[in-house]
Image (cartoon, rainbow, N blue to C red):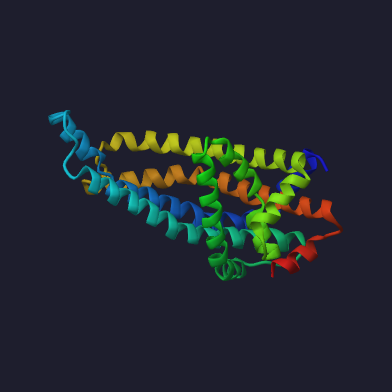
Amino acid sequence: MGLGAWFARCLGAVRRGWQLLLPILLVTQVLPAVALSVLALVFDPSARWDAELTADSTALPANFGVDLAIWLSVLLGGSLIFGLVQCVGWAAGAWVVTRQAAGEQVTLGGAFGYGLRRALGLWGWSLIFTLIMTLGFCLCFLPGVYAAFALAMAGPVYLFERRDPIGRSHRMLRDRLGLLLGRVALTGGAVIALGIVVGMVEGAVLTPFGTEPLAAMDTAVGAVLAIGGAALLGLPAYLAQLVGLLVTYAEQRAHEGPVNSGQLAAELG
């Protein structure tokens, strides 16, 4: 099975499920991203720091350490909370793609119901995955890249197999390095490229609102709408990540032994 067949399967999953996948990803991925960006603006002390540094560039701004700690704490806490919401979406999206591939009828309510049931466990494992990759990137970067590839299948492994997602995902990479490496690289490349575009667009659309866009009602509304518009551009990235990794996991399972969409749907629960 080459990249052409993999890409065709990905497109097939998107064509079958986009009417359900888009609202799922909008609610669970785009809206949390917007909320986190707005939180970052609310607690961002950089405008005051710039004003104080302009007045006296020889001293750190007043309460620099406290302000920085509060800002980072808000971002970390928000990321953790919104990460749980995002896990609802990943599980719900996996349910839709898998059951549609098996020819079953699916509904938005059923997808969210499944996502809510599986989100907490997936979120807990995702925290471990993130910690491992972060430590890897801190250790001269390359270990982090390897960890990202080694853990790429860990989320689907947890949802379908419910045991040893870290070890199982790593074994998949070792057993079929070339097959998994190319597919994950293409998926990750698309996600990173679109993420860069979203970041650039968000920075550009916020520039007209000044250094303190939330200081007045009119600029605050405009800034929030601009952030929301930029975040919508990231919707294809979430879709590519969900579908690309799920199809890659299904191909890995097919290489290991006979498996069909019905069996995978049954395993998913």
Q: Residue at x 64, y 49 (%)?
A: 152
Which residue occupies 21% across, 46% down? 216
Name the foreground residue: 115 vs 267: 267
Res. 185 image quadrant: top right
Quarter of the picture containing the N terminus is: top right
Q: Give 154 or 191, whichever is nearer the viewer.
A: 154
Would you say 58 lies left or right of 195 here? left
Residue 68 picture quarter: top left
Against 238, is 46 above or below? Answer: above
The C terminus - image quarter: bottom right
Residue 48: horizontal and vertical position, in percent?
20, 39
Q: Position of residue 24 (x, y in %)?
A: 55, 59
Q: Position of residue 138 (x, y in %)?
A: 49, 40
Residue at image coords 53%, 62%: 124
Residue 146, compared with residue 29, is above or below; it is above
Instruction: Name the foreground residue: 218 vs 249.
Output: 249
Q: Residue at x 38, y 57 (%)?
A: 77
61 versus 38 height, above or below:
above
| Left/right of residue 42 with respect to residue 226 in the rendered view | left
> How many numbered marks are there?
0
Q: Position of residue 266 (x, y in %)?
A: 75, 69
Judge whether residue 12 can be spotted in this image: no
